[in-house]
Image (tube, rainbow, N blue to C red):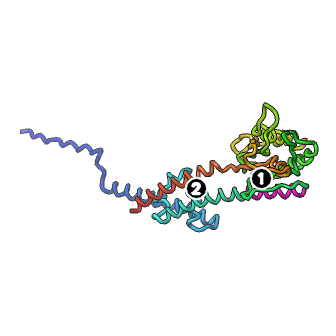
């Protein structure tokens, strides 16, 4: 009798089965990669410390600022426990506040310097307490009663003002500090003569006459007309305030009326966007602190 031996087919390997040792190797590889990433991250922060000779907190702030354009992307795990993360966020906010304060102080120094340069040229001006408004007294630039044209006697003073203003703004590109520079006209309380212009129109025309004199300056006229702020908009504009911002609220005497007829130059800092960004940053930081507190708990 012929015997037949049953042929045994080898089993097909299960494609979803991972041997134990392969699984262990994968886990070890993941652990190594994670450790390397952590060491690289810490190395970057340590590198900032060594390069800038700053403390660990300051170095982390520098690192976070470079790595994240938006504070909302900040990962608490990267910067450590809740306290460290909150310290970094507070530091970021302090930097924003410091930058805004420094810009205002720089603006004050620029206007103080302008006042000194004018004084050396024989032009006396007054500066407001907040260092934002330059007032040109009637002794320097005079407007006749009801008039908006600049008299010939004042032309020489305006040339000196143009020279000092241009040199101060051009130096270190100081003009980029300002969102705008307003030439403001003012009147006394007496009604403007004529049928077609009230005191509001008269004050605006005085400002226009002064700005046109700057634009017509032989040396710096084209510089003034071409100056742009940091946003690319024209730097100079005019405003008329009639008698609404007087030196003397009740100008009864000729001297008081003369002094109320004047020009002021107002320097507006390019910081309104900064203030809006400050509010946004503050809100983002508070929200992130809440997330960090939740994460740490």
| Magenta region includes residue 115 | yes
The magenta span reads 107-120
Disc nearer the start of the sequence (2/1): 2
Locate the C terminus and report the quarter of the image it occupies.
bottom left
Q: Nearer the viewer, residue 121 or 230?
A: 121
Percent of width and height locating residue 33: 45, 57
Question: Taking the image as drawn, is residue 166 in sight?
Answer: no
Percent of width and height locating residue 247: 77, 52
Residue at point 88% right, 41% down? 150
Question: Taking the image as drawn, is residue 122 in sight?
Answer: yes
Looking at the image, residue 282 sits to the left or right of residue 105; the answer is left
Locate the N terminus and report the quarter of the image it occupies.
top left
What secondary structure predominates along the stretch shown in magenta? helix
Residue at point 30% right, 44% down? 15
| Magenta region includes residue 292 | no
Q: Nearer the viewer, residue 281 or 163?
A: 163
Q: Which residue is mark 1?
A: 248
Percent of width and height locating residue 19: 30, 53
| In the depicted structure, whether residue 1 falls above or below residue 121 | above
Percent of width and height locating residue 269: 70, 50
At mark 2, the secondary structure is helix
Looking at the image, residue 266 sits to the left or right of residue 122; the answer is left
Residue occupying the far top of the picture: 196
Q: Nearer the viewer, residue 177 or 57?
A: 177
At mark 1, the secondary structure is loop
Q: Which residue is mark 2?
A: 65
Discs 2/1, front: 1
Looking at the image, residue 197 sits to the left or right of residue 81; the answer is right
């Amino acid at each position: 009798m012929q015997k037949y031996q049953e042929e045994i087919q080898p089993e097909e390997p299960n494609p979803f089965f991972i041997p134990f040792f392969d699984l262990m190797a994968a886990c070890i590889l993941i652990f190594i990669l994670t450790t390397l990433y952590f060491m690289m991250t810490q190395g970057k922060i340590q590198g900032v410390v060594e390069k800038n000779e700053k403390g660990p907190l300051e170095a982390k702030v520098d690192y976070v600022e470079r790595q994240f354009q938006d504070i909302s992307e900040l990962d608490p795990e990267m910067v450590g426990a809740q306290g460290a993360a909150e310290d970094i966020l507070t530091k970021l906010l302090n930097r924003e506040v410091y930058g805004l304060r420094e810009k205002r102080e720089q603006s004050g120094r620029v206007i103080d310097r302008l006042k000194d340069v004018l004084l050396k040229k024989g032009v006396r001006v007054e500066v407001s307490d907040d260092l934002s408004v330059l007032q040109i007294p009637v002794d320097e630039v005079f407007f006749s009663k009801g008039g908006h044209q600049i008299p010939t006697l004042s032309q020489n003073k305006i040339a000196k003002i143009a020279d000092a203003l241009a040199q101060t703004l051009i130096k270190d590109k100081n003009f980029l500090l300002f969102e705008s520079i307003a030439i403001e006209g003012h009147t006394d309380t007496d009604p403007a003569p004529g049928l077609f212009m009230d005191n509001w129109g008269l004050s605006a025309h005085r400002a226009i006459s002064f700005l046109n004199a700057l634009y017509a300056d032989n040396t710096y006229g084209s510089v003034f007309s071409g100056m742009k702020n940091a946003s690319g908009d024209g730097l100079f504009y005019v405003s008329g305030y009639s008698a609404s911002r007087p030196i003397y609220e009740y100008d009864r005497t000729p001297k008081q009326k003369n002094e109320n007829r004047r020009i002021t130059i107002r320097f507006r800092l390019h910081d309104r966007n900064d203030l809006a960004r400050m509010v946004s940053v503050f809100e983002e930081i508070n929200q992130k602190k809440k997330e960090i507190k939740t994460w740490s708990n």
